[in-house]
Amino acid sequence: MWQTLRDAAADGVDPDHADDILRTLELPTLARRWQVRLTLPASIEVRHEPR
């Protein structure tokens, strides 16, 4: 059952609904992975010193 729901979640079934079914059956919930993109401002100062 767990494998079937995991595969279904990978194919587009709402993972929250799959987790609800697994909890009802007292099975472990699906592993979740999150990808977050961060944009950070950067300031670089370049000094040119004559030789």
Image (cartoon, grey):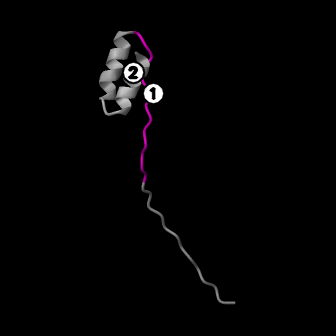
Q: Is residue 7 above or below residue 22?
A: below
- Can residue 10 be seen by looking at this rendering? yes
Identify the residue at horizontal 35%, vertical 29% (top origin): 9
Q: Amino acid at mark 1?
A: Ala
Q: Which mark is residue 4?
A: 2
Identify the residue at horizontal 44%, vertical 57% (top origin): 40
Identify the residue at horizontal 42%, vertical 56% (top origin): 39
Q: Nearer the viewer, residue 35 or 49?
A: 35
Q: Amino acid at mark 2?
A: Thr
Q: Residues within 10 Å of mark 1 (few under 14, many from 20)?
A: few
SS label for mark 1:
loop
Q: Is residue 41 above or below residue 51?
A: above
Q: Position of residue 28 (x, y in %)?
A: 45, 17
Q: Nearer the viewer, residue 48 or 13?
A: 13
Which stretch did the figure color magenta?
A: 26-38
Task: Specify which label sits upstream in the sequence, 1 or 2.
Answer: 2
Q: Quadrant of residue 1?
A: top left
